[in-house]
Image (tube, rainbow, N blue to C red):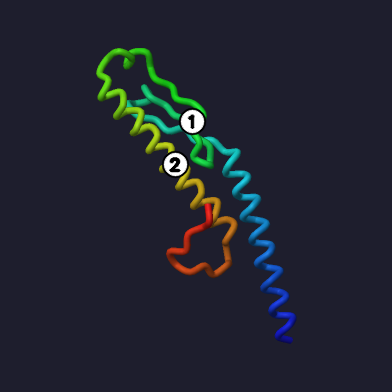
Amino acid sequence: MMKNALAGIMQQAQKMQDNLKKAQEELGAMEVHGESGGGLVTIVMTGKREVRKVSIDPSLVGDDKDMLEDLVAAAINDAVHKVGKMKKEKMADVTAGIPIPPGFQMPF
């Protein structure tokens, strides 16, 4: 009886691991768009938090360097925040019904 229960738990753990790996791959392929300045600066970032593209409206170039730097940082932070939210939602799907300790961080 105990052996069957353990086998079931191991099978469930393996399935969750497979689902996590799949979720990681899907997240890596996803892209989010961060922006600031009402869209004057936009960032395209993957689910792995790699910046793919930075777009800066020409009206900002040569203007106020400090403001431009702040807008780029804000757009990156917006994208990072969106990736974090996307990961949280994805993990909620993967771990649905599995008791995970509060505050447990996924390994990615």
> Quick check: 67 above or below 102?
above
- Where is residue 15 shown, x and y percent of the image? 68, 62
Q: Crowding near pointer 1: few (<14 within 10 Å), some, many (20+)?
A: some
> Quick check: 5 above or below 82?
below
Q: Crowding near pointer 2: few (<14 within 10 Å), some, many (20+)?
A: some
- Where is residue 101 shown, x and y percent of the image? 48, 69
Among numbered discs 1 and 2, the one appearing first in the sequence: 1
Do residues under tags 1 and 2 come within 8 Å of each other at their CB atoms? no
Q: Quadrant of the N terminus?
A: bottom right
> Quick check: 39 above or below 25?
above
Q: Nearer the viewer, mark 1 or mark 2?
A: 1
Instruction: Give the SS element for disc 2.
Output: helix
- Where is residue 4 shown, x and y percent of the image? 74, 80
Q: Quadrant of residue 91?
A: bottom right
Horizontally, residue 92 falls left or right of residue 73, namely right
- Where is residue 88 shown, x and y percent of the image? 49, 52
Q: Which mark is residue 52?
A: none
Q: What residue is disc 2 on?
A: 82
Residue at image location 64% in from the left, 52% down from the top: 21
Residue at image location 73% in from the left, 82% down from the top: 3
Horizontally, residue 87 falls left or right of residue 74, namely right
Identified by mark 1, the residue type is Val
Identified by mark 2, the residue type is Lys
Horizontally, residue 47 falls left or right of residue 71, namely right
Residue at image location 63% in from the left, 45% down from the top: 25
Instruction: Give the SS element for disc 1.
Output: strand
Q: What residue is disc 1 on?
A: 44
Q: Quadrant of residue 82?
A: top left
Q: Measure the alpha-carbon separation of dots 1 and 2.
A: 11 Å
> Quick check: 46 above or below 72?
below
